[in-house]
Image: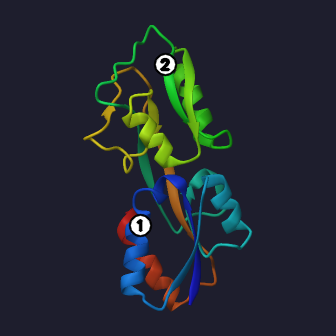
Amino acid sequence: MTFSLGIAENYAMTVFPAILRRIRQQLSGMHARVVVDYDERVAKGWQSGHLDIAIGATRFFSAPPEKSWLSQLHWVCAPDCMPDPHQPLALIVYGETCFMREMIRQAVTAAGFEYKIVVTSSNMGVITAAIESGMGIALIGPDIFRQSTMKKVGLPLPDLTLSYGMYVAPHRNKALGRVLEILDSFFY
C-alpha cells in the first residue's frame, strides 16, 4: 500500500528521518509518497485531497486536526554571537512565501528593534548553518534548537508559540492507522 504524507519543512530536518526509518522497519509493505514544503502548501495539498496525512501549522487548515500540539519558538544565535541591541539586528529568515518571515519581522519591530536581513532561505539546513556560523539571530522551533551549537538570544524579544496539527484524510484504513500510530509517537 502507498500513502501520501505532507510535512512542514521544519520537521523534515529533525524527526522525519526517524519517522521514515520506523515506517520502513515496522511496516515493510508500506510505501510513502512524501511532500516536504511550507506549511501553507502542505495544507493546500491536504485540503485538495492529494495527501492522506498532513503535518503543519493549524492556521492554514480549514478542518480541525486529528491531533494538535503547541510548539514554543526560540530566538537563537551562535554561542559566541553577542547581538548589540543598539545596532540593527542581523536576522536569518525564511523564504519570501513563509508565514514565519512576517511573524519575525512583526515581533522584532514590535519590540522596538531595527533589523537587517542577512540570510533568507526556504531550506532549514541553510537556516541552521547560518545560525551556527554566527551570521545572526533566528526564530526556530525546539526540535531544531541544538544546545551545543546555539544559544537563546538574551534580548527582550517576545515569546512566540505555534499550534501544529496532524490532519488525516477521511478514507483511512487499517494500514493507514498503523502509520498514524507511528506518527503519534513522534509528535505528542
* Residue 118 drawn at (x, y percent): 54, 26
Rendering quarter of residue 78: top left
At numbered mark 1, what does the secondary structure look like: helix, strand or loop?
A: helix
Give the crowd class for mark 2: few <14, some 14-19, many >=20 residues within 10 Å: some
Give the crowd class for mark 1: few <14, some 14-19, many >=20 residues within 10 Å: few
Please state which amino acid type lies under the numbered disc 1: Pro
Rendering quarter of residue 27: bottom left
Residue at the (53%, 54%) spot, across then down:
9
Residue occupied by mark 2: 89
Q: How is the image coloured?
A: rainbow
Q: With respect to residue 77, does 62 lie above or below?
A: below
Could you give the CA–CA distance between mark 2 and mark 1, rounded to whole angstroms?
33 Å
- Residue 73 visible, this orientation: yes
Residue at the (44%, 51%) spot, across then down:
70
* Residue 123 drawn at (x, y percent): 54, 48
Please state which amino acid type lies under the numbered disc 2: Leu
Residue occupied by mark 1: 17
